[in-house]
Every structure is written in C-alpha cells, then in structure tokens.
Amino acid sequence: MRRLAGRVLAYVLLVVVAVIGFAPFVYLLIISTKRRIDIVAEVPPSLNFNVDQIVRNYSEVINSQGMLSFTGNSIIVVGISTLVALIIGVPAAYAFSRLRFRGRDAWASTVLSFRFMPPVAVAIPIFLMIRSIGFSNSYPGLIIPYVAFTLPLVIWIMIGFFDEVPRDIDDAALVDGCGRVEVLWRVLLPIVGSGIIVSAIFGAIFIWNEFLVALYIINSRSLQTVTLGAATLVSAQRPIDWNIAAAVGIVTLIPIFLFSLFIQRYVVRGITAGAVR
Amino acid sequence: MIAQADRTTLAEQQRRGRFRKWSLPSRDVLLLLGPAVLYLIAFSVFPLLYSLRISFTDQGAAQDAAQWIGLENYARLLSDPFFWNAATNTAAMVGAAVTIQVVLGTALAVFFNLNLRGSWLVRGILILPMLLTPIVVGVMWRALFNPDWGIINWALEEVGLDAPNWLGSTEWAIRTLILVDVWQWTPFVFLIVFARLQALSVEVFEAAQVDGAGAIAMIRRITLPLLWPAIAFAAIFRAIDAFRSFDLVYGLSYGGPARSTTTLSFLAFQNGFQFQNYGYAAATAYVMVIILMVATTVLLRYVRLRGADAA
C-alpha cells in the first residue's frame, strides 16, 4: 500500500513538473487568440476559440506589424551568419581535435572563453567599428558580429564530434596521400554530418535570439530582426496590446520549437558549447 | 677550418633549437585554424581591447569629441550609487537563482533517475525553456504575472492566498526576476546532473543497499559526493550566465521599478545606449569583463580537471 501511494505521488510530481514547464506556453498561446477585451474580461481565459479572431490577431502581427519582413530579415541574417561560422569554424575544430601544435589547449580555452564575455562589453565597440566601415543599419552589419559570436559555439561543439571519430580513419586517408584539408573535406565531413547539423541549429537559435547588438546596429524598422522587432512591439516601457504581444511571442518561438525536436540529445552539449563531455 | 665547421654546427644547433621554439605552425594548422583565429582577433579580441580603450575616455555618441581621461570613469563608478545598486542586484540574483537552481535541479535529477514511465517526454519539455528567446520569456511571464488578469494571481486567489505585487514593487520585482530565471534554467542544472547520475554504476548503490543504507542516507552519503563535480560545474556555468543577464531583464522588468532589477549589464546598457555615454558604459562593462575572466578561468580549469579525471 505504501509502495503504491509512493508511486502515485511520484507520477503526480512528474505531471506537476511537466505542467510548470509547459503551461506558460499554453497560456501565451491562448492569450494570442483572444480579443483584447476578453483577456481582461475572462479570467481565467475561456477555451472557446473564435477562428476569425485568431486569423485577425495573427494577420495583424504578420502584416501590419511587420513580423513577416522581420522574419525575412532574420532568416537572411541567421542563414548567412551560421553558414560562414560553419565554414570558418569546422576546419578550426578539426585542427584543435587532430593536429599537435604549440599552445593548442591554451588557444582552445581562449576561443571558448569568448562565449562567456558579456555582450554589453563589446556592443559599443562593435557598433563603432561597423559604423566606421559603413555597414551600420545593414545585413552585413549584423552578420559580421554574429559570425564572431557563433564561432566559439561551432568550434566547441565540433571538437566534441571530431574527437569521437577514431584517428585511424584520418591516418588511413593520410597514408593514401591525401592532405589534411582533403581528409577533412572528403573523409571526415560526411562522418560528422550530425555534428554540423547540431552546431548549425545551436548557432541559428543563438543568432535568432540575439538582441543587444541588433539594437545598436539596426535603426530602421524595415531591417529589424524578429527578436528586435518583437522587443520593440512589446517594449516593457509602454502599455501593450496583449493579444498582439502574445501572438508576436508565439511567432518568434515557433522555429525554436521545431528546431528543439532535432537537438534533444545534444542540448547540454550545445548550451555548454561542448564543455561537458 | 675546423673552428669554422664548429661554429657552423653551433649556429646550426642554435638555429634548430630556436627554430623549433619559435617556428610558425605547420601549413595545415595555418590553413585550417588561420581563418577562425584571424576572424576572432578582428571581431572579438579587438572589440574587447577597443572597449578597454573607450573606458579611459569620455567618448559619447559624437565620435570625434573623445578625450583621454584616464581612470576617471572607474573612479566615478566607485562613488556612483547606481553602480553599487546594480552590483547588489546582480549579486543577489546570481546568488539566489543559482542556489535555487542547484537544489531544485539536483532534486529533479534524483527524481528522474527513478525512470518513471513517460519521464522522457517531460525531459523533452524541460529542454525548451533554455532555448527560448529571453525577450519573449520576459513578455510571457509579464502576462502570467499580470496584476489585473494574469492567471497566476487568479490561481492564488482561488486557493485563498494574497498575490504579491510581482513586478510592481521594488521588494518583489527582483524575486520575480529570480523566479523566472529559475524556471528557465533549472532544467540546465538538472540535465547536467542527470547525465552524470545515469553514468554512475549501479553497483555502488546495490552494495549500499545490501549494507542496509536507507534512501536518504544513500543520497547524502553516496549520490551527492559522486555528483559533486557535475553540480559544481553547472553552478559555476550558471553563475557566469546569470551574472551577464540582460535580455530577460529588458523583457521582463526593464530594470525597474525604481532600478530594483537593474543588473550590471542593464546599467551598462542604459549608460551606453540610452544616455550615450560610451566611456562610462565601457568602464561599467569592463568591471564585468574582469570578474568574468576570473570566473571563466576557474571554470575552464575545472573542465580540464574533469577531463583528466575521466582519463
């Protein structure tokens, strides 16, 4: 009897944990379907959904609030930054994993330590640099710093994946007369494909979420990224249309929900950038 | 003739010795690592040094007016009550949030180690908060905590409790900020500790059970000591990230009310972005950089120690 009671209690606890973790999103989702007046009038919100109202809220967010163009900007910036970070970062990770050279560990630690620097410390100099080369308020103005932010992440995640590949594979290819670069390109890249996807997704989420540097670099509404646009729409300083704010939040979170399905297994590795293995 | 030969040998030896010491890295290293290193020097190292330089000037938004003022910004920081307020808030947040996350996260890890049916699904849910846009997390919790129609206040009233003024009072706003950080990041501690727990061998526990150890004794005497490295790693990692928090503050409370949730990052942002006082903002941020460099060194040494442990 005590055993049974214990088991029931354990499952109740499990459900409570799940609810605490997930209910906030459900609440945001429900709010995003309501009329402004209903949010205030119905507490707790009713579960009667009106399709017209849902369409109205989301089409306002997408069309008149500019969320569509923000999404376009974000996709361009996220896509190019992630790609460049992979092109530069994957070979570097390979070098850290395979080659012996003086100060290797010190270099690797230094690269990782950039992940821990506060963005406020570099936002102003980056803004001044970008302005002086004439890239403020443009895509390159965001892409250039975002590649720098994503590189440590990519390098550290990829070192972990390269370390898992036996060295014999490289050695066999080297004996066959391939150069290091060729070994990486022809032999190893296909093997660490999942690592590349994982680091691409973490890099992409990181850039998608980035806010402070975008705030400095972008000053025209048409070039705002999703996160910057969302922050301006729901700025904590002024009163908010909560149904619209909630819909903006939901639209911002959708890609993250989708991506998170692919990286469940790697989430710790991604967030610590490979520091725990 | 002989002397000359000797000298050549000596020179040759010296050259070789030197050469080995100061040689350029091999072509492969340059080719593979060069682009990343150059990029990071240009767009990570240089901005950090540039920031240091700015912190010694009175640079504002108008670029040419900057003058070297030495340590004046730093001296001003020390006598700025707003700086000490932000430092106190940051310390309170880091201390409280990380402590709660470590306790809850470890408890969750032990609980999930029961491997209840369906717990994989809950683990999947718990991964989400960490990945979310902090700005949106802030907005979401502002809705949940809304004093007029938020569902949390409604629920508290239903069970007969008085709801606190979550984000409206100086007393509560910092607690609310900590609470949201705990919601978002407890899963991080949980996952790290849980991974370590699953890697422990079952035999230790079985042996203890045979010796007649109770559940609580097992957790205290065996589980916790074995988990300690993972817990410490997660705690330092979280402390570093909580110390830098900015986006969540911006989205949740905008540093208010009455600066009660202004963290160091948020203060540096206000000085720089709002008041356009770049020099002073850079000095504020650099105090953080120095603290973070120390913390990061500790963390990285720890990572390496762990690697050595495993090997």
Image (cartoon, rainbow, N blue to C red):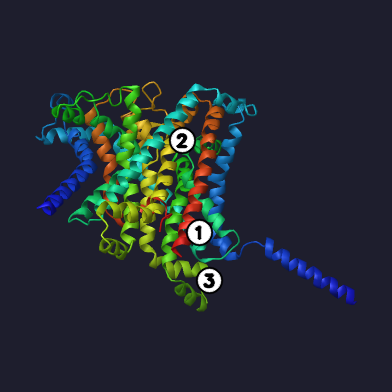
Mark 1 is surrounded, within 10 Å at the Cα level, by few (under 14), some (14 to 19) or many (20 or more) other residues, namely many
Q: Say what amino acid the circle numbered 2 marks.
A: Ile
Q: Which residue is mark 3?
A: A179
The amino acid type of the residue labelled 3 equals Gly
- Estimate the x, y position of residue B307 in percent, counting from the top left: 46, 60
Which residue is located at x 52 percent, y 69 percent? Answer: A180
Say which element carries label 2. Answer: helix
- Which sits in the foreground, B235 or B216? B216
Q: CA distance from mark 1 to mark 3?
A: 16 Å
Asked if badges 2 and 3 are on one and the same chain, I answer: yes
Instruction: Inspect the image, locate mark 1, and give the three-letter code of the amino acid beneath it.
Output: Ala
Which numbered disc flags the more N-terminal residue, 2 or 1? 1
Q: Quadrant of the N terminus of chain B?
A: bottom right
Q: Residue at x 18, y 33 (%)?
A: A56
Query: Residue B5 location, x and y as percent?
Result: 85, 75
Question: Can you tell which mark lies on residue A217?
Answer: 2
Q: Nearer the viewer, residue A72 or A212?
A: A212
